[in-house]
Image (spheres, rainbow, N blue to C red):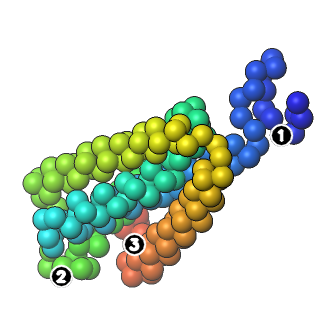
């Protein structure tokens, strides 16, 4: 056993270095995909009733793709990393009051948040959480049938490329929105 490639405790094999890279990158990609999607679904809910749910289902497919792993242990580790990585993303959006600032930008004169909007937003979050959980579980159930063969290797490469492109797109959209209404103007009001 090569110590530089495997992390082991008393001879018990935990993860290879390639597994750790996949787990950390997949967890961070899942976090980047998850929270901004909730904000966008919340914004879409003000224009139509059905579009946010269609959007959430599409996001859940990409979340499940990001969670695709070789084993269940890898999937749960990715999920844990995605939760930990989502906390600073959530804090960033929450402190910046991004949803309502974006709504005022998209719908001029929208105003301030209401209690019913908070309830609807929580319902969208619960639907997004459920959809992401179902796709993460279903990708790993289907993966167990495929095993680790050529099809899975191709799907794994496709996952890496597609999720990376989506994450770059989300980060670019956040940077564009950041130029439109910077966070530091809101954070200055707290200090």
Determine whether 174 is above or below 152 in the image: below
Q: Is residue 156 found left or right of 50 in the rendered image?
A: right
The residue closer to the viewer here, 8 or 121, is 8
The residue mark sitting in front, 2 or 1, is: 1
Q: Is residue 176 visible?
A: yes
- Marked residue nearer the N-terminal end (3 or 2): 2
Q: In what element is the residue under mark 3? A: helix
Residue named by callout 3: 185
Residue at screen point 74% across, 46% down = 18
Looking at the figure, which quarter contains the N terminus?
top right
Residues at badges 3 and 2 in contact (C-beta under 8 Å)? no
- In the depicted view, which residue is nearer to us: 78 or 97? 78
Relative to 26, residue 175 above or below: below
Q: Which residue is mark 1?
A: 5
Q: In whole angstroms, how far apart are the C-alphas of marks 2 and 1?
A: 55 Å
Distance between the alpha carbons at the discs numbered 1 and 3: 46 Å
What quarter of the picture does the C terminus occupy? Answer: bottom left
**39 or 25: nearer the viewer:** 25
Badge 2, how many Cα within 10 Å: few under 14, some, many 20+? few
126 left or right of 78 in image: left
- Relative side of 33 to 148, left or right: left
Residue drawn where x is 26% and y is 79% of the image: 105
Residue 82 in sight from this viewpoint:
no
Badge 2 is on which residue? 108
Residue 189 appears left or right of 156: left
**Disc 3 from disc 2: Cα separation:** 19 Å
Question: Quick one: which residue is furthest to the top in this view?
Answer: 10
Which of label 1 and label 3 is nearer to you? Answer: 1
Q: Which secondary structure lies at badge 1?
A: loop
Q: Earlier in the sequence, mark 1 or mark 3?
A: 1
């Amino acid at each position: 056993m090569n110590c530089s490639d495997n992390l082991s405790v008393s001879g018990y094999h935990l993860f290879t270095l390639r597994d750790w890279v996949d787990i950390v990158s997949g967890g961070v990609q899942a976090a980047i995909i998850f929270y901004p999607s909730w904000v966008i679904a919340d914004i879409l809910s003000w224009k139509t009733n059905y579009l946010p749910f269609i959007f959430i289902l599409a996001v859940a497919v990409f979340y499940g793709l990001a969670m695709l792993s070789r084993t269940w242990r890898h999937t749960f580790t990715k999920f844990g990393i995605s939760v930990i990585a989502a906390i600073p993303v959530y804090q960033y959006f929450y402190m910046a009051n991004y949803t309502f600032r974006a709504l005022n930008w998209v719908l001029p004169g929208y105003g301030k948040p209401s209690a019913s909007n908070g309830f609807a937003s929580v319902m969208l979050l619960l639907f997004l959480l459920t959809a992401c959980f179902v796709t993460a579980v279903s990708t790993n159930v289907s993966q167990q049938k495929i095993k680790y063969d050529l099809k899975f290797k191709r799907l794994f490469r496709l996952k890496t490329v597609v999720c990376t492109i989506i994450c770059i797109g989300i980060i670019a959209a956040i940077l564009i929105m950041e130029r439109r209404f910077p966070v530091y103007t809101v954070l200055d009001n707290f200090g």
